[in-house]
């Protein structure tokens, strides 16, 4: 009897300890999960801050404007702010983003969970709470500053509505925050608004923005010191083109900005972008001069974009638009090459070029350069932009096909005086040349390139 009583007593004590622990201390606080029912009914604002560091990379620590927890104020602190949540579910990308950020730098990562507030079917209700979220963040940053943190070390990544929240926080510190990244800042209710009511290039020492859905959920005009427009900022490859794609049709383009940023945290994918006035000019090869010399490298999308801030053009504030194309699937990298062709045909030729590269191992990659037909004139250099899905380090053979697109009519020849191929992503690689080629229309011509003379640019 006695031993049974002791066992029951022990069991009761253990149960009590478990109850006490679960009531007062959620072991690993998680992002607020709500339902579509909550979205219909609406939720009152409640902001949770969850800290991840290399000491606790997978188990968050709840922090607030009185408790800093593991946060080390001498290190960089990155705040991640989500946007509108019409179904109440947690953003699917949060864990990957935390892991990626901690892998590239020993920092504090703070997830700003305002799901109670962002979860509503009424977008304007969520939008109306953005300034309150910014105020909560300011109170927390004030505590950090009181403990010795520097505004230089504060970085805010804002997604959709979260990008404007980041801007409001930046305004409260007169643009002295270290950096803000806007991932497809929300367009509806913000398009055409004055700078004080949205994200603005003056909101931090450096503001970079990725626009991936400018014709629907995202903001069209530039909002940063550098604004990146993947695939022109409109339809993203790999996303559904019709409503039959279900929910993905509505959110895939918008979300792509987050996945492109995530790809910048992978070692094998540095997406290069090209400063340019328009997507059309970029596609037509008119903006491929960055990276030729070390004086102005090409900007890199995502986490390392701030390496380019010293090259920003003059202006108050300095603003640059940059364009690039991506593949359909993760990690989205496409490898850009410039193909410079000088011809010596007596008559003008208009057409497109298909170029194929092959390396020693037999790997091949192809690019059809057909954005707009090129005009080849005698002794004029035409610069074309070729985009490949694979990056071949040592090119052994090149093939070219010239086409006018005409099905009937005479077959033309394109007489090439010089062809030059250079990698835009790796300007340090040797440039490859070939001289005196004649391309018969629609016939593939294969040749081995030679190294270009050193004096040529």
Image (cartoon, grey):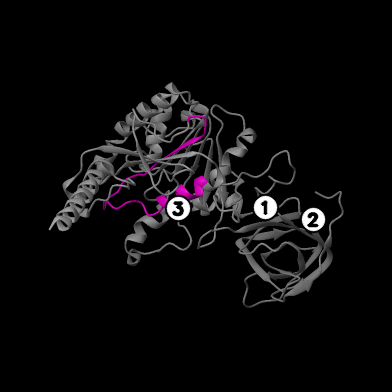
Discs 3/1, front: 3
Mark 2 nearby-residue class (10 Å; few <14, some 14–19, many ≥20): some
Q: Where residue 369 sits in the image (x, y, percent)?
A: 63, 63
Magenta region: 73-102
Q: Where residue 358 sits in the image (x, y, percent)?
A: 72, 70
Which comes sooner in the sequence, label 2 or label 3?
3
Residue 143: numbered disc: none
Nearer the observer, 327 or 151: 151
Mark 3 nearby-residue class (10 Å; few <14, some 14–19, many ≥20): few
**Residue 212 among magenta residues:** no
Which comes sooner in the sequence, label 3 or label 1?
3
Mark 1 nearby-residue class (10 Å; few <14, some 14–19, many ≥20): many
Q: Residue furthest top?
A: 146
Residue plotted at (50% across, 45% down) = 101
Which comes sooner in the sequence, label 1 or label 2?
1
Nearer the observer, 100 or 26: 26
Q: Which residue is mark 1?
A: 425
Answer above or below: position of 21 versus 387.
Answer: above
SS type, badge 2: loop
Separation (CA) of disc 1 from disc 2: 12 Å
Q: Is residue 301 left or right of residue 336?
A: left
């Amino acid at each position: 009897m006695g031993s049974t009583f002791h066992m029951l007593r022990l069991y009761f004590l253990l149960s009590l300890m478990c109850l006490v622990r679960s009531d007062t201390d959620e072991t690993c606080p998680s992002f607020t999960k709500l339902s579509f029912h909550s979205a219909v009914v609406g939720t009152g604002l409640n902001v949770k801050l969850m800290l991840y560091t290399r000491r606790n990379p997978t188990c968050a620590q709840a922090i607030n404007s009185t408790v800093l927890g593991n946060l080390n104020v001498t290190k960089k602190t990155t705040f991640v702010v989500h946007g509108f949540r019409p179904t109440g579910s947690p953003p699917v990308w949060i864990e990957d983003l935390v892991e990626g950020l901690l892998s590239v730098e020993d920092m504090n990562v703070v997830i700003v969970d305002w799901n109670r507030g962002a979860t509503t079917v009424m977008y304007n209700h969520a939008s109306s709470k953005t300034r309150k979220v910014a105020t909560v963040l300011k109170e927390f940053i004030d505590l950090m500053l009181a403990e010795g943190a520097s505004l230089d070390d504060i970085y805010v990544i804002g997604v959709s509505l979260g990008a404007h929240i980041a801007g409001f926080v930046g305004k409260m510190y007169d643009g002295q925050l270290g950096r803000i990244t806007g991932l497809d800042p929300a367009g509806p209710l913000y398009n055409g608004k004055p700078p004080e009511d949205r994200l603005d290039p003056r909101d931090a020492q450096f503001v970079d923005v990725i626009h991936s859905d400018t014709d629907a959920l995202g903001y069209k005009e530039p909002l940063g010191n550098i604004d990146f427009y993947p695939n022109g900022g409109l339809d993203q490859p790999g996303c559904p083109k019709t409503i039959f794609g279900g929910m993905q049709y509505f959110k895939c383009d918008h979300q792509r900005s987050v996945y492109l940023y995530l790809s910048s945290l992978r070692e094998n994918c540095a997406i290069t972008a090209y400063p340019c006035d328009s997507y059309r000019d970029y596609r037509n090869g008119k903006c491929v001069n960055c990276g030729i010399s070390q004086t102005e490298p090409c900007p890199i999308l995502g986490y390392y974009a701030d390496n380019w801030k010293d090259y920003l053009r003059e202006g108050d504030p300095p603003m640059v638009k940059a364009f690039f194309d991506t593949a359909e699937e993760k990690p989205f990298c496409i490898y850009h090459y410039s193909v410079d062709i000088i011809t010596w045909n007596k008559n003008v030729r208009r057409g497109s070029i298909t170029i194929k590269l092959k390396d020693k191992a037999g790997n091949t990659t192809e690019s059809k350069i057909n954005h707009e037909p090129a005009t080849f004139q005698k002794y004029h250099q035409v610069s074309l932009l070729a985009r490949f899905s694979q990056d071949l380090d040592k090119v052994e053979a090149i093939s070219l096909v010239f086409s006018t697109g005409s099905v009937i009519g005479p077959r033309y020849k394109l007489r090439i005086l010089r062809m030059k191929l250079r990698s835009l992503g790796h300007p340090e690689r040797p440039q490859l040349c070939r001289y005196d080629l004649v391309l018969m229309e629609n016939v593939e011509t294969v040749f081995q390139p030679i190294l270009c003379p050193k004096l040529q640019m």
